[in-house]
Image (tube, grey):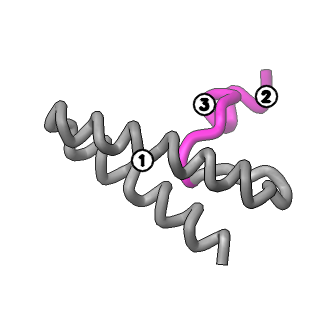
């Protein structure tokens, strides 16, 4: 209804959503998954996707400090 009309959808799009206080283990696992995806994106020459993944990794690493 209204939410979909105002926002164009119901899925989060944009910056990485971090649940409240993820554990260090959860954050590390997410970073590892993103790094594997980053490697695959570079190998497939999907550089725009690789840049998005790099930015997400940096956000997560920054949140860990």
| Tag 2–tag 1 contact (CB < 8 Å) | no
Residue 8: give x, y in percent of width and height. Answer: 60, 30
Q: Quadrant of residue 45?
A: top left
- Name the residue: 48% across, 57% down: 57
40 on left or right of 17: left
If you read the primary sequence from the N terminus, does the residue marked by circle 1 or circle 3 appear first? 3
Q: Which mark is residue 2?
A: 2
Q: Which mark is residue 19?
A: none
Residue that protrudes farthest toward the right in the picture: 20
User: Where does residue 60 sit, x and y in percent of width and height?
Assistant: 58, 61
Q: Nearest to the eye among marks 2 and 1: give it.
A: 1
Q: Which residue position is annotated with label 3?
A: 8
Q: Is residue 15 above or below residue 49?
A: below
Q: CA distance from mark 1 to mark 3?
A: 30 Å
Q: Which residues are the magenta region?
A: 1-15
Q: Nearer the viewer, residue 43 or 15?
A: 43
Q: Nearer the viewer, mark 3 or mark 2?
A: 3
Q: Where in the figure is residue 56, as x and y percent of width and height?
A: 49, 55
Q: Residues within 10 Å of mark 3 (few under 14, many from 20)?
A: few
Residue 35: assigned label: 1
Helix, strand or loop status at disc 1: helix
Q: Earlier in the sequence, mark 3 or mark 2?
A: 2
Q: Earlier in the sequence, mark 2 or mark 1?
A: 2
| Secondary structure under the numbered disc 3 in the rendered image | loop
Residue at the extreme front of the image, as rendered: 25
* Callout count: 3
Q: CA distance from mark 2 to mark 1?
A: 37 Å
> Furthest-bottom residue in view?
65
Q: Residue furthest top?
A: 1
Q: Is residue 7 magenta?
A: yes
């Amino acid at each position: 209804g209204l939410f979909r009309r105002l926002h164009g959808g119901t899925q989060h799009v944009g910056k990485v959503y971090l649940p409240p206080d993820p554990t260090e283990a959860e954050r590390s696992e997410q970073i590892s998954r993103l790094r594997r995806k980053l490697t695959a994106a570079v190998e497939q020459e999907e550089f725009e996707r690789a840049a998005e993944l790099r930015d997400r990794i940096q956000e997560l690493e920054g949140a860990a400090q």
